[in-house]
Image (cartoon, helix red, strand yellow):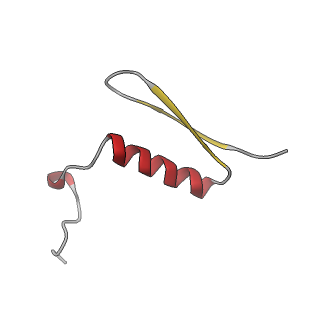
Amino acid sequence: MTTRHVADITDPVTGEMTTLTAATESELDQLVDEHLEQHYPTLQSEDPEPAGMG
């Protein structure tokens, strides 16, 4: 039996649900990160680590 890793992401505005699946936990983490960055990009003013400041 193959184990699948699943994440359900619900849009807080529309209520639309997206289900992501992957063969491994690390692949799922990457898919979730990519999905969130694509749909909810971090504004530069909210970025806790500004580039060139360290």
Residue 12 location (% of width, % of height): 35, 27
Location of residue 49 (image quadrant) = bottom left
Identify whether 25 is placed above or below 38: below
Q: Quadrant of the N terminus?
A: top right
**Residue most toward the front?**
38
Residue 16 location (% of width, % of height): 43, 23
Residue at 31 percent of width and 41 percent of height: 40
Relative to the observer, which residue lies in front, 27 or 48? 27
Q: In the drawing, does residue 54 fall left or right of residue 28?
A: left
**Residue most toward the right?**
1
Residue at 17 percent of width and 75 percent of height: 52
Relative to the observer, which residue lies in front, 20 or 49? 20
Residue at 35 percent of width and 48 percent of height: 37
Q: In the drawing, does residue 20 fall left or right of residue 35?
A: right
Q: Quadrant of the C terminus?
A: bottom left
Residue at 66 percent of width and 54 percent of height: 24
Residue 42 location (% of width, % of height): 25, 49
Q: How many tags in the picture? A: 0
Identify whether 12 is placed above or below 4: above
Location of residue 15 (image quadrant) = top left
Identify whether 52 is placed above or below 18: below
